[in-house]
Amino acid sequence: MNLLTVDEVTQLWRCHRVTVLRLMQRGTLRYVEVDGEPRFDEAEVGKLNHPGIARYPHLTIAVAPEPNSPTPSQRVEDEYDYYHERCRIAALESAEVIRRAKWLVVDSRLAIANASRAVYRLSL
């Protein structure tokens, strides 16, 4: 497995660096990170190579989905479920913070009351 850098892919495809980065962002061009830099499998880059990729990257790339990959609607549902769960957890955490804050108020009022009683007793 030979790994290529972004610059090597741009030279191979004769396209702009932004084209490669956009294809990465869309998930069309799969990559792995090596020392924080994206690297591409040479075989996969060769499969996606097309003469018009520099001018029309959104039209020239047609990649078959992986066999078990979710459909776009499933991805949307999964993302919705994920954020819904995150919001539910945040609401529970917020409720816990509010409950603790109320007890802190009660504790501080008790401390003030006890302190004022102690001051009153000393003044007698």
Image (cartoon, helix red, strand yellow):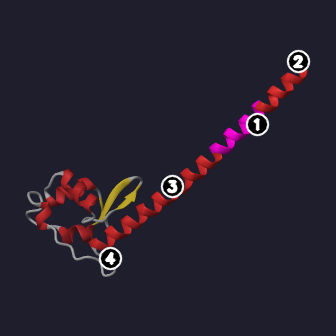
What's the residue type where badge 1 is placed?
Answer: Leu
Query: What type is the residue that disc 3 sits on?
Result: Ala
Of the residues tagged 3 and 1, which is closer to the observer? 1
Q: Earlier in the sequence, mark 3 or mark 1?
A: 3
Question: In the rendered image, which quarter contains the N terminus?
Answer: bottom left
Residue 91 got which mark?
3
Tell me where the magenta segment starts and ends, as one range: 101-112
Residue identifier under label 1: 110
Residue 30 vs 110, above or below: the answer is below
Task: List the residue tagged with mark 2.
Answer: 123
Residue at the front extreme of this rendering:
124
Mark 2 vs mark 4: which is more N-terminal? Answer: 4
Mark 1 neighbour density, 10 Å: few (under 14) some (14–19) many (20 or more): few
Residue linked to disc 4 = 69
Give the percent coordinates (x, y) of residue 81.
Answer: 41, 67
- Of marks 4 and 3, which one's residue comes earlier in the chain? 4
How much space separates mark 1 and mark 2, taking CA atoms?
20 Å
- Tell me the amino acid under the disc marked 2: Ser
Of mark 3 and mark 2, the one earlier in the sequence is 3
Q: Is residue 121 above or below residue 24?
A: above
The amino acid on which the numbered mark 4 sits, given as a three-letter code, is Ser
Q: Position of residue 25 (x, y in %)?
A: 27, 58
Q: Are marks 1 and 2 in contact (CB under 8 Å)?
A: no
Q: Earlier in the sequence, mark 4 or mark 1?
A: 4
Given this view, does label 4 or label 3 mark the residue nearer the observer?
A: 3
- For discs 3 and 2, the disc positioned in front in the rendered view: 2
Is 47 positioned to the left or the right of 107 in the image? left
Residue at (77% x, 34% y) in the render: 111
Q: In this view of the protein, which residue sits in the foreground, 84 or 29?
A: 84
